[in-house]
Image (spheres, rainbow, N blue to C red):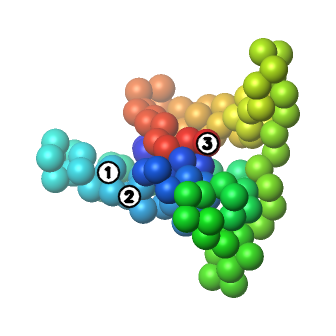
Amino acid sequence: IVFSDGGRILGLGDLAAWGMGIPIGKLDLYTVCAGVNPHRTMPVILDAGCTDASGNSDKIVIRESPKYTGLKQDRAKHQSEAGTTVNTAFYTEKSFVGEFMQAACDVFGERVLLQFEDFN
């Protein structure tokens, strides 16, 4: 499983759900270059919101687009103990990412391979 939140796409910035091509492309490479069976792969986007146009390098209006199907809200953030701003969906005791990883292990077994890709 290659999963992303679409938050840091190839230098473009926060594309959120529009970043789904990244997990798909990574799994395509594994299939073509490493012989991984494509029926045993899964691309996933964790939709944790989307920043406004200031969050991507081309200042693209994403979440206001009628074609955007993801959450049309800011990413939830808070200050860490170290004083840095972090994404609440990923850095809390019961984080969204932690729940996803546990669910993947529950469904596919403890040997499931989980790859983080282009996270915010």
106, 50: nearer the viewer: 50
Q: Quadrant of the N terminus?
A: top left
Q: Quadrant of the C terminus?
A: top right
Distance CA(mark 1)–CA(mark 2): 5 Å
47, 16: nearer the viewer: 16
Q: Residue at x 80, y 55 (%)?
A: 74
Q: Position of residue 75 (x, y in %)?
A: 77, 50
Location of mark 2 (residue): 24
The reply to whether the C-beta atoms of the residues labelled 1 and 2 are less than 8 Å apart is yes
Q: Amino acid at mark 3?
A: Asn
Q: Residue at x 14, y 47 (%)?
A: 33
Tell which circle, 3 or 2, labels the residue nearer the N-terminal end: 2
Q: Amino acid at mark 1?
A: Leu
Total marks in image: 3
Q: Amino acid at mark 2?
A: Ile
| Closer to the eye: label 3 or 1 | 3
Residue 27: assigned label: 1
Distance CA(mark 3)–CA(mark 1): 20 Å
Judged from the image, the secondary structure of the residue bearing numbered disc 1 is helix
